[in-house]
Every structure is written in structure tokens, then in C-alpha cells.
Image (tube, rainbow, N blue to C red):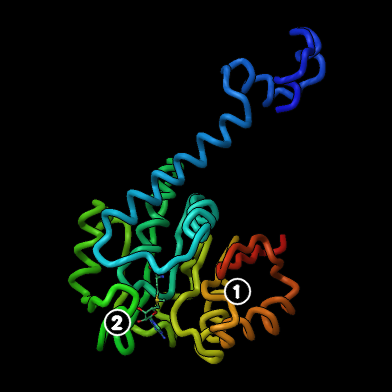
Amino acid sequence: MHRQNSPLSHSNILDTAPMSSFNTWMNGESAIKQGSRRSMEYKRLIDYADKRLIGRMALYDGEAELIAKTVEIKGLHVEIGCLWGGTAILAMLAKNMNKVTGHVVSIDFMLGKFWNSEDPVIGKLPTPQDVYMNMIRFGLEGDISVLRCSSYPFPLAGHIKPVTALIDGDHREEGCRRDWESLKDRTKKYILFHDYDLYHPGVTGVVDEIVRADENWKEHAHINTLIVFERVE
Ligand SMILES: C[S@@+](CC[C@H](N)C(=O)[O-])C[C@H]1O[C@@H](n2cnc3c(N)ncnc32)[C@H](O)[C@@H]1O
């Protein structure tokens, strides 16, 4: 990055730059440019998901990008808490954008609160049909499996091991702890928690008292109310 803007001669660059930056330099695109191009791609991806979705993505600033960056790796992503399907769609679009294979499983019992009255943020009642229609609108009906059931007992067989998982279902202490317990031993790389904030003491309590105390996991990233833990190798 620095080297490309410095007055070093061609041969100096060849002598000192690692091969990867040499290749980048040869391709005529600096790391800064690549980084900003990638940011633009995430932005476009998130705008696309947001505008096309029936309902809404229940996320705050910066969270969609962090989810996309964390789950864009090969393999299965599992989420607890589907609502309109926004985060599930975002996850699968991120994998597609990164040209990796994968699948998303989204678990939601589609009962209670939002489903009986309305999603208070947009004043609209979600239905299971809306969720399935969303998958079709994005052409992702074959890539995302929506399981209409409770996350407890956990519905996936023990040999199914996601690479990443998002916990965004029951925000009470007991429910969040159960979801963590269902996922912590089988998830290979990252576990994300949404609504890690003062308004959700159940989530905050589980993260601060249980997840942080688990030596197999360490904090990887945190933006707004989204916190990501990474398995310690
Ligand atoms: C905050 S919303 C999820 C939002 C979604 N991740 C998004 O941002 O697009 C929480 C959802 O979790 C579901 N839920 C809550 N407790 C659950 C449980 N024990 N099992 C399955 N789903 C649950 C609710 O029905 C609700 O739709």
C-alpha cells in the first residue's frame, strides 16, 4: 500500500515488496483501491437486499456489512431468528458474492410477538408466505432452508456442523443461553450475537458472563449491537 505511493524505483519495489503486493501492483490496483472496491460491493449488496426484501432487515448501522464479511466463507451458516428472512438472505448473497459454496439454515417458530400483532418497526404483520416469497424474490429458495420450529430442542442432527452461526432468536437469558449451548460445540469458526446492548440484558448477560468465560471462544469483532466470537484454534 505505502510502497505504491512512494517514489521507490521499479527495482526497489521488486526487491522489497512481498509477492502478493507485487501482484497487486502489477494488476494496477492498490490495496487501498481493492479495499474501497470491496466496501462498495458490500454496500451494493446490502442496498440490493434491503430494497428488494418484503419487510425489513432488523439491523443497525454497520451490522449488515459485518455479518456479510463474517459469513462469506464456504460452508453452512445457521441462524436462529429469521423474521422476514433478511439476515438469511444477506448471508447467502455474501457467499455468492465471494464465489464460495454454502447453504443457509434459518430457524424460526414464527409465533408470538411480531407474528401475532405486527413488526412494530414497519407496522406490518409478517407471514410465513412473505418469508418464502422473499427467498424466491432473490432466487435463493434452493440455498436457504427455513425451518419453522423452535430452536429448542435444537432441530439439526449432531453431525451437522455449521461454519458460522447467528443467534438472534429468543433474547431472554434462558433462551439465548440455550441457543449458545446448542451451537458452541458444533460451530466451526464464528458465532454472532445480535442485540448485544443495554436493552437486551438477557443477551448481554449470556455474552458477558458465559461466552466471554469460555476459553474456546474469543471476541473477534463488535459493531453497534452485533458481536462476533471466533473459535480458538
Ligand atoms: C429479531 S427477530 C430476527 C431478525 C432477523 N435475524 C433479521 O435481522 O432479519 C427474532 C425472531 O426470532 C424468533 N424466535 C424467538 N424465539 C425463538 C425460538 N425459541 N425458536 C425459534 N425462533 C424464535 C421470533 O419469532 C422472531 O421472528
- Reading the image, the residue beneath label 2 is 110
Callout 1, which amino acid? Asp
The quadrant the N terminus occupies is top right
Callout 2, which amino acid? Met
Q: Residues within 10 Å of mark 2 (few under 14, many from 20)?
A: many
The picture places residue 178, in percent across and down from the top left corner, at 53, 86
Q: Quadrant of ligand 1?
A: bottom left
Label 1's element? loop
Q: In the rendered image, which quarter is residue 220 located in? A: bottom right
In this picture, residue 148 sits left or right of residue 24: left
Q: In the rendered image, which quarter is residue 76 located in? A: bottom left
- Reading the image, the residue beneath label 1 is 185
Alpha carbon of mark 2 to alpha carbon of mark 1: how far?
26 Å
In this picture, residue 63 sits left or right of residue 217: left
The tag on residue 153 is none
Q: Is residue 98 above or below residue 75?
A: above
Q: Residue at x 69, y 80 (%)?
A: 208
Label 2's element? loop
> Does ligand 1 reach within 8 Å of label 2's beta carbon?
yes
Marks 2 & 1, CB-CB < 8 Å contact: no
In this picture, residue 42 sits left or right of residue 18: left
